[in-house]
Amino acid sequence: MRRPLVFPLLFLFQLLFQLLFLLGVASTIACAQQYDLVLEGGRVIDPETRLDAIRNVGIRDGKIVRITGEPLSGRRMIHAAGLVVAPGFIDLHQHAQGLASQHVKAFDGVTTALEMEIGARDVTEFLKSKQGNSLIHYGTTASYVAARALAFGAPLSEGTILPKSGFATDQAATPEQIQQIQQRLRDQLDAGALGVGMGIEYVPGASRLEVIDMFRVAAERKLPVYTHMRSAGRVDPGSAIQSTEEVIGAAAITGASLHIVHINSTCLRDSLECLSMIEGARARGLDITTEAYPYIAGMTAINSAVFNPGWREKQGIDYSNLVLPDTGEHLTKERFDELHNSSKPQWVLIFSNTQQVVDAIIPNPLVMIASDGLESHPRNAGTFSRVIAQYVREKKTLTLMEALRKMTLMPAQMLERSTPAARRKGRLQEGADADIVVFDPETIADRSTFQKPMEHSVGVHYLLVAGTPVIDDEKLVPNVFPGQAITGSGTANGSVP
Ligand SMILES: [Zn+2]
């Protein structure tokens, strides 16, 4: 009576085993395809661990999950043989934040571009305007010049970052105004700013004490000051050397970390002296960093206080050194007066540096690469690939590892002063954000010129922003906006939301 039951039981067990087997196979397949994307066989370079080897990189949920010599399989396989796989470049100094600029930044290998020098007029507005429609990661400092303009009752108009030269830039602030500026900066830090941006040269009326008081605001939040220093002058008083002393002094007095922007275009022929001053201050334990871009011309607003009376004597240049970017027109005194007195902002190129100086600055180990990007200057589109093309490949004054360190790890470490989220950036390591540039080290080059500043660079084959390709097989991917806000510790979580 019992026997007939054995067969159905055996059958059930067989069915169970088959099911388990099938489940096992399925999970093996899932295991084999556990990555969203795999970069296969590229030359992986990480400036922090000094890894420089052929590896496969597995990416899942916007993170680098696995780096190995073993084969990996993912839903998307990208063959990177012959190409360098490096952390996406971090540009601490990017003014033009629109999509046209983000496109050319992407072709230049940049995955994060931050407005740190001057800062946004209104941080909440800035972050809101970029949310959900940004190709690459973005963020900003709190703008001291905007806060000062507000305290003087002459707020900056929408779309401008620099004040026009006038009473609000040239007069000293009263103690009450200094307090108002400080309060505005605190509010902007609360809104997510990454530090205080101080364009001191744009407000020459600022007293030494006013500058120190602004550093105090940054110091109380343990956030850095990014500064365009008081003067690019060559003679005292008002020299770049004195200006460097001023900000190093303010950092020492207050304890704020300090980043001196574009040492090339502020210190000019005294750049190596300025660098030795920074080196000395660092040796005494101060937290001071700097950056440069690889071009002989600077650019700024012609109606700004940079061109207050005496600029020619101070900077050792003349009207003809000023060139309009759109037409190539060299200025005369008459044309200069007309444009300087206009309320219409107009960018002007300033040819005031030499190739020799730039060539000495870029390879210096203290100097990060940052573009000071504006759409009328080739530095916007070409800075990063130009450094690799000219200094790694042609002049051979930088190794590729060192060049990448200046573009990835160093700016990420600078950003760590503002947010712990930056520890996951600037690294090609397991656990890091999948912000990755894949480029051909033999062909990467800038194509932007003073005549055609928005020509994009060549040689970047793939660019991943938080794991999403925005450049795919050397072409821009339409309608993807993986860029995220990077915010300071003033916000609730102090990290990438
Ligand atoms: Zn500047």
Image (tube, rainbow, N blue to C red):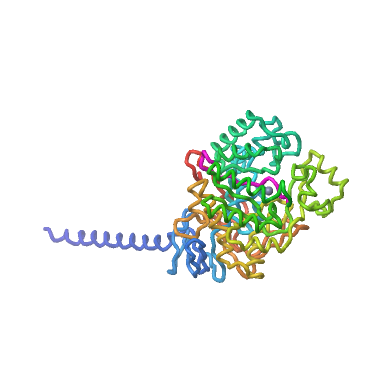
Query: How many numbered callouts?
Result: 0
| Quadrant in the rendering for residue 162 | top right
| Quadrant in the rendering for residue 302 | top right
Residue visible at 53% across and 67% down? Answer: 79
Q: Is residue 152 left or right of residue 223?
A: right
Residue 312 location in percent, x, y? 80, 49
Instruction: Point out the residue furthest to the left here.
Output: 1
Decide which of 469, 407 is in the foreground and name it: 407
Q: Relative to 338, is 91 above or below? A: below
Q: Is residue 451 left or right of residue 16?
A: right
Indicate the quadrant containing the N terminus: top left, top right, bottom left or bottom right.
bottom left
Residue visible at 57% across and 47% down? Answer: 258
Residue visible at 58% across and 32% down? Answer: 183
Residue 175 location in percent, x, y? 63, 30
Q: In the rendered structure, does residue 217 fall within the stretch colored magenta?
A: no
Q: Main secondary structure of the magenta part?
A: loop
Instruction: Point out the residue furthest to the right here.
Output: 334
Q: Relative to 33, is 138 above or below? A: above
Q: In the rendered structure, does residue 231 fall within the stretch colored magenta?
A: yes
What stretch of residues is rendered in magenta?
Answer: 219-233
Instruction: Point out the residue furthest to the top here.
Output: 176
| Quadrant in the rendering for residue 395 | bottom right
Residue 281 location in percent, x, y? 56, 52
**Could you tell me if residue 184 is visible in this image?**
yes
